[in-house]
Amino acid sequence: MKSAMGTRDRFLRALFVALAVGLGWGVRGDFGHLLGAMFPGAALGLGFAYVTGQKSMFKWMPLLGAIGGLGISTGGAMSYGILHGYAKSDTFINYSYGFFTLVLQGGAWGCFGCALLGLALEKERLKATELVSAIATVYITGAAVYFLVVTLGGFHINPPRSDLSIGYTGGVIGLFVWLVLNKKRYGFKGALCGYIGFGLGMALGRFLANVSYLQPFSVNHWNIMEVSCGFIGGFVFTFGMLGKKFPELPEGEGYPLLSVYGVFYVMAFIPVMHRLRRIRPEEKLQQWAASLESYGYANPELLSRMILAAIHVVCFLGFVGAGIWLYLHFRNKHRFAAFPVLYFSGLMLLIQNLNALFPFYPRQPRSINMHFVFWILYALMIAYAILRKPRDVTDPDDVAERIHWRKWVAGAVAVFVFIIVMAGFVNGEKTMASANTRWPLWSWRQGPHTR
């Protein structure tokens, strides 16, 4: 049976989520680790709920935003900097290994959060015992694979950094097995789309960042990789998961209170924690003042304190936004379904811009400022919400939950082969200036590479 949602319609809906998660992942690059990944994860849950066009999903937004934020953030514990260095190398064995490990790590980053989103929206609600069983399976298989590969086998994925991503890959294997054995079709579909989307997103994002070395304008290649990773991951997940008819959020059983927690976690907790954990006044005030003085601003110390105060105002606006969202949620104001993702994204973008001193940058000739690109992404999100109202279009469960896994895997392999082939033409002297190699073990900090 053919899906009721046309390909163009599905594409445009997925594009909105791609913009939201791409923006979130780009901003994440300034903050890093588990905390930074909460923004794109929450944006994924909120954006997906919005583009379904279903009134029931507006009520699910607080939980999906929280689940996405917590689920995607788990990948922040992995180290991936050197893996990107391998993918910038100019030798086949090193860059092919680098891109492959980026697929593994990006896939693990997206798999857990996307599986949780799918499980939360299963027709039969996930039981507490099932959740405990799934978590235990992930930990046991992750520990087993880590023990076999690292402890017994002595293989290190990116020495001297952490080998935790090997354990994550083992956890992914365990999660897929658990989903199949427990017949969680929509959860499996979420895990598959998340793994392929964010896995290819990480690898293809790095390839595009490598390509940026060849163009005549100065641009932050890390930002290109990060935005691309979120954009591709958000697009693939949404494109694959749309079409299912979702149930109403239960009115009892503690769900109203969980919704309140979800709203404040997304709209207030995440911005405040970025301020408390990533913007330490004793360090930042001095750094900002030194940068502002180099930009030619008078009285940079006073301006630095004003910037910190502005960040505090933005955090306060997070609590205001939480109050507005709660009002819309409990009054079931579905026509304002775009509000949570737009308001939350705006808050996080302001915090990032102020922390990075973007409003005070002097204009740099022949350069592309990715902070300005972030605002373009945000403007496109707003334009989408104004010009296009997602309709409620759904398929029967057997169609919506159908998993064309062979096509997904074949497509992913084709994209990966394309990356490897093209990297042979793109990687070279310019990318090697900041590359790493695994064979032999070498870092660009050690001086000229010797083969």
Image (cartoon, grey):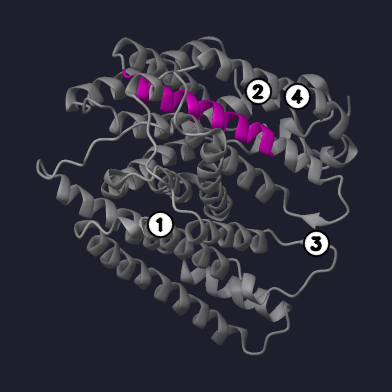
Label 2 vs 4, first from the N-terminus: 2
Give the residue at x 44% y 53%.
389
Q: Is residue 392 left or right of residue 375?
A: left
Depth check: 138 or 195 in front? 195
Please say if 419 is above or below 68: above
Quadrant that contains the N terminus: top left
Give the residue at x 35% y 60%.
336
Magenta part of the protein: which range? 184-205
Q: Which residue is mark 1?
A: 338
Depth check: 59 or 254 in front? 59
Q: Which residue is mark 4?
A: 418
Q: Looking at numbered disc 1 in the image, what kind of residue is underneath it?
A: Ala
In magenta stretch: residue 327: no
Please say if 173 is above or below 24: above
Q: Looking at numbered disc 4 in the image, what kind of residue is underneath it?
A: Phe
In x, y percent, where is residue 426?
Answer: 85, 34
Label 1 vs 3, first from the N-terminus: 1
Give the residue at x 41% y 74%.
312
Q: CA distance from mark 1 to mark 4?
A: 36 Å
In x, y percent, where is residue 321?
Answer: 33, 66
Quadrant that contains the C terminus: top right
> Helix or strand or loop: what does disc 3 sit on?
strand
Q: Looking at numbered disc 3 in the image, what kind of residue is underneath it?
A: Ser
Q: Are marks 3 and 4 in contact (CB under 8 Å)?
A: no
Closest to the camera, between mark 1 and mark 4, is 1
Q: CA distance from mark 1 to mark 3?
A: 33 Å
Q: Are marks 1 and 2 in contact (CB under 8 Å)?
A: no
